[in-house]
Amino acid sequence: MTNSLFILANKNLKKIIVTGITYVFSVSAFAQTENRNWNGKKCAVVLTYDDALNIHLDKVIPMLNSYQLKGTFYLIGSSLVVSQRIEEWRMAAKQGHELGNHTLNHPCNGNLPGREFVKPETDLSKYTVARAVKETQITNTLLKAIDGKDERTFAYPCGDLTIRDTLYYNFLKNDFVAARGVSSGYLKRKEVDFSNINSFFQNGSTAEQMIAQVEEAEKKGSFIVFLFHGVGGEHSLNIDLEEHRKLLEYLKKRKKDIWVTTMVDLAKYSRGN
């Protein structure tokens, strides 16, 4: 009788141990899945570059290619750097970089403080919604002629969302997968506003500062969109080329945990497409 009780107790103990081990592994697997919501990675990073600068073609794209990373370049349709270097932009697209829409003439609201640089002909406050929509659609046509793509994203010049009280992107939603804004913040996939995706503006930033922002995104299980202009010069808003290289080196080393992607692919993934 005593021996039978011992055997029964032993069997029950084994069941408890097996159940416990299974539970631990299940929780661990669930936690790993929960922490890898970005294409199997812990967080996502998007590198975006505004205004179609020579430095983007001459320095940034070769540097990205050397680390096997992709970027999103927001082109101004009327820029000479676009019209005079079309074949180079076409090659960049073939290499996997995204050519995004930054409008035809980069209109900004000249009525806001610090906007002395805005010319009367590109003052968004003097635009009609119809003009803004048409110029943006024209730029899409130009970009498709360069890269042959139908899916792309938009970036608001100067981060200006409205013409007077009207959100002009509301009339462009069918033309884009998403739009990038200029407000920072770490969001979950389900919290993303695809008409105004958060980004982190960079000017004079060090690699250490930018890496800290990536690590914060990872900690929060979120994503980060970097907003660059000049990289090593050519723009008043600028970061040092070497600091940019150090950021790319860090991202390359962390490729198992960090998904570096384009704006259009991040938006499509977040939407579940």
Image: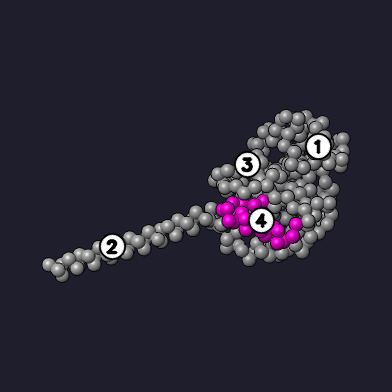
Rounded to the nearest angstrom, the CA distance separating label 1 from label 4 is: 29 Å
Q: Quadrant of residue 161?
A: top right
What secondary structure is found at the residue carrying circle 3?
A: loop
Task: Answer whether labels 2 and 3 touch (C-beta < 8 Å).
Answer: no
Which dot, 3 or 4, sits closer to the camera?
4
Q: Please report whichever mark, 1 or 4, sits nearer to the chain's N-terminal start.
A: 1
Report which residue position mark 2 lands on: 15
Q: Which of the two residues, 224 or 216, is positioned nearer the viewer here?
A: 216
Rounded to the nearest angstrom, the CA distance separating label 2 from label 3 is: 49 Å
Which span of residues is magenta-colored?
205-225
Residue 42 screen position, x and y as percent: 56, 57
- Residue 72 appears in the figure: no
Q: Please report whichever mark, 2 or 3, sits nearer to the chain's N-terminal start.
A: 2
**Residue at the (70%, 50%) spot, across then down:** 200
Q: Residues within 10 Å of mark 3 (few under 14, many from 20)?
A: some
Residue furthest bottom in the image: 3
Report which residue position mark 4 lands on: 213
**Residue at the (62%, 41%) spot, across then down:** 193
At label 1, the amino acid type is Leu
**Residue at the (86%, 35%) spot, across then down:** 121
Q: Quadrant of residue 240?
A: bottom right
Report which residue position mark 1 lands on: 112
Rounded to the nearest angstrom, the CA distance separating label 3 from label 1 is: 25 Å
Which dot, 3 or 1, sits closer to the camera?
1
